[in-house]
Amino acid sequence: MNKSLCSKDLYCTFLRVTSQRYSALSLSEVSPIDLSHDSISRWLTEAKCQPKDIWKEAENQVLSTSGVLIADETILDHNRSKKIELVRWQYSGTVHDIIKGIGMLNFLWVDDKNSVCPMDFRIYEPKEDGKTKNEHFREMLKLAKRREVKPEAVLANSWYSSLDNLKYIRDLGWNWVMGLKKNRVVNKGEKLENLIIPEGGLKVHLRGYGFITVFRLVARNGNTRYYGTNIENITKKEMISFVRKRWEIEVFHRELKQTCGLENCQARTSRSQRNHIVLSVLSWINLNYARKKHNLTLYRQQWNTIKTAIANQLKYELTVT
């Protein structure tokens, strides 16, 4: 076997076009150049793909458009894995339970035309760096500020609306729109769930921070959620617009997992997993570019890749029977 190294282009293209198998063995079986699966595995262990590679792809769009910065985490499900270094027990909002997986905090840019672009990410593994999710969050905000990102607002769920985080965003000179838990204490010891909040929002005092505006939004299924912001004179319509934009990161996470093999790497080392995650995000960026250019969803692009082979196999099966 030729021991030529794999490449980012080859690996990313493989992630884009395959929809079933994402292993080094599978890539070696279909590679246009003669590569052994050991060579691919070795390359994945030795490569140095980093979150800054994603910023290189995102920089032009982020700095040339007006938009919001959305933060949220997702858990890469590895419930059956026993020896992958980054895997740990943690809570998954998708399954509403504790599972074994890799925690990934993402920053997503959504511009005024609802064009989506991943900006940055961090892997939550306190055994490696000793950092909490909130510390990663603030470090990523600091880096975004250094990169001269100017969001209309920072959007996140209630996990990231701690007092330290809100004050940090304010100190950066940015606005924020965050989910708040119903038992969040405001004013003189009152809980949000016990307040009468009018349609146009209510100004309250958040101890240690100052005055903010809160809204109570009720979904069609009856679920009640509370949102706060430091934006002055914000209307309910504007608040709902921000909340809807935050949903884009949920779609992004789903597409990453379903079309780019984000959860499907079985390599054991931390470096291999981190490289695979970066390359999965880069694959999504390329798929998203094709979506905008050709008006094709990521799922349609995958189907277009395999439908000819399926049609030929169907014709063959019907002929021989």
Image (cartoon, grey):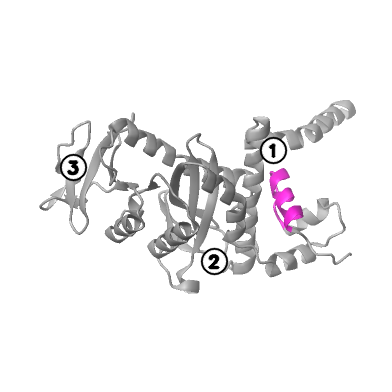
The quarter in which the N terminus is drawn is bottom right
Q: Residues within 10 Å of mark 1 (few under 14, many from 20)?
A: some
Of pointers 2 and 1, the one earlier in the residue sequence: 2
Instruction: Report the span colored magenta.
Output: 8-23
Which residue occupies 33% across, 50% down? 158
Amino acid type shown at disc 1: Gln
Magenta segment main secondary structure: helix
Residue 93 picture location, percent across and down: 42, 49
* Above or below, comparing residue 286 to residue 11 in the picture: above
The secondary element bearing badge 3 is classed as strand
Return the residue nearer the eye: 137 or 159.
137
Determine the CA span between mark 1 and mark 3.
48 Å
Residue at the left extreme? 188
Identify the residue under disc 1. 302
Tell me, for residue 203, which label it has, or none: 3
Amino acid type shown at disc 2: Leu
- Verify CB contact (< 8 Å) between mark 1 and mark 3: no
Of pointers 2 and 3, the one earlier in the residue sequence: 2
Query: Residue 177 vs residue 193: left or right?
Result: right
Return the residue nearer the eye: 203 or 146.
146
* Above or below, comparing residue 44 to residue 292 in the picture: below
Query: Residue 184 vs residue 78: left or right?
Result: left
Q: Is residue 68 magenta?
A: no
Locate residue 130: give its quadrant. Answer: bottom left
Residue 151 picture location, percent across and down: 43, 47
